[in-house]
Amino acid sequence: MMYSVPGKFQPATPPYLVRQRESSKQLYFAMLDERGGSAGQIDELANAKSRSLLLEQLVVAAEIDTDFPTDMRSLPSVLHNAHDQAAQAYRRYLDGRHAGSPRRYFSCRAHALYFLRAVAPTKLVDGAWLYGVLARWQDSRLAPLIQTYLEELGCGNPAQNHVLLYRQLLARYGCDNWQDGPDGHFTQGAVQLALAHHAREFLPELIGFNLGYEQLPLHLLITAYELNELDIDPYYFSLHVTIDNASTGHARKALQTVLDNSPRTGDVSEFQRRVGNGFRLNLVGMGTPQAIESFDIEQELQRVFADKALIGAQLHSDYCLVGGRSVSDWLSSPGEIVDLLSALQSAGWIRRGESPEQSRFWRLLTDEQAPMFGVFDGYEQQLLKDWILADSGENPTARTTNRFRNRQIPGPVDEAPAGLQSGTSVAQIIARHASGNPKLGRGADVDALFQKLVRIDTKAEAFAVLTGLLSPANHPTPAGLVATRLYADLFQHVTSP
């Protein structure tokens, strides 16, 4: 296999001085816009900027210290040892918790919801880096990566699509407003999207990135455990513990892909260097530990009030005074939010250390027909609640005893008929999927998709139509889910091109 070597890879300045040419957030949303003229393609400007982002972040990644081996032959044992160390560390964590130790990650429920919002830009492009390998579907050495991508997409089942699962998680707990987060929250997601659109040039890095991402980190195990304790559904996180397992799951496929693609006659050391840098690329930007550590309940509450002030400064009547000043006057000066919170406490509107129901301000937000109902979303209400509860008898850091709960997972929508037999033709599979998606309510995009598939009778022709709908932006849509189900069937059951 021939790999291109990106030009100008080594910078003239130290890695810590490298500056991105555009904010990660802007580039993240530009790539999700996919304005390249056809489904799954980004425009030329986003393409150029995302390539630059990859080069810059690979320079940063190259300086990160990891246990990635210098000899590829030792890679399986190194990964096995890392897995064992994570498992043993988790066992020690559980022993400590059972002995009465407090939670390690989340100080309160608002802290956990803050984390869900902070990592949303990454979780909402889960698996995106693998999109680009769909173009190499005829290369058997990359088949495990394609299969992994299809599984990240739930093979078209909305109840198993990882992006949809995370969207539902955010919506369930009132954490939908993640888009205005700081730029650092978007770096890792932007890297994953950039890999999706530059797979051909950066294939060794993509293979290495996938290997690193599919390993079992200790923080994933602890996160799932503590979310469950706080009565937050941990399924999205616990799913990744099982589906990424090193025995039969994505971690095993990732390792096999590295070994299968290692050159037999080419420059093995160059391939290994690039795979190693891709492996380290998982660690750029803000990861789970950094997201958790960045929470400060005082600063976060002040940020929320400042955001509300920008919108509500002129929407309050002047008959209500706090500390001798009207609410509109307070809100017109966002720099005085700390003083406003103090004034609300001095005036008795907020009674910290007591049940939130004792605070008049809380009742303005939550009571039936409350004047400010809907002003604070679910996350913001939880943040205020935990801030009020501080130092009360209802300690938000208290250990709970919840256990994993059974989940009610919605059934699949418009699934194609089962029972495909060996030798079934492409046209027959398409027809079965078309008949399995009733026209009533399936939408114009789905109708247009099946119209494009009329008279197609080869796998290559079908994939040319379907692939763009499996892109990071399109796969969670109704047409994307239908396309994913059809692609998965063709990929698994049709051997001829």
Image: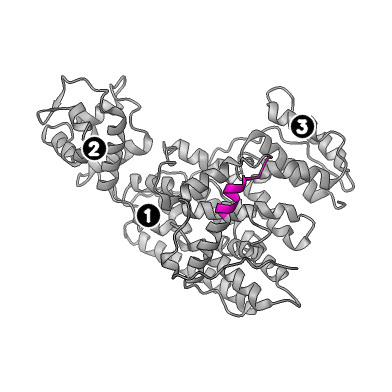
Q: Which residue is mark 1?
A: 292
Up-down: is 319 above or below 403? above
Magenta span:
39-50
In the rendered structure, does residue 42 fall within the stretch colored magenta? yes
Element carrying mark 2: helix
In the rendered structure, does residue 429 fall within the stretch colored magenta? no
Disc 1 residue crowd, few under 14, some 14–19, many 20+, Cα 10 Å: many
Amino acid type of the residue tagged 3 in the rendering: Gly
> Dots 2 and 3: beta carbons under 8 Å?
no
- Which quadrant of the rendered structure holds the N terminus? bottom right
**Left or right: where 5 falls relative to 1:** left
Element carrying mark 1: helix
> Dots 3 and 1: beta carbons under 8 Å?
no
Up-down: is 185 above or below 435? below
**Left or right: where 350 falls relative to 33:** left
Up-down: is 77 above or below 207? below
Residue 330, position in %: x, y?
A: 18, 32
Q: Which residue is mark 2?
A: 334
Residue 384, position in %: x, y?
A: 28, 39
Q: Earlier in the sequence, mark 2 or mark 1?
A: 1
Tell me if I can see residue 404 in this picture: no
Up-down: is 1 above or below 423? below
User: How far apart are the alpha carbons under marks 3 and 1?
Assistant: 44 Å
Amino acid type of the residue tagged 2 in the rendering: Pro
Q: Quick one: 287 or 389, which is closer to the camera?
A: 287
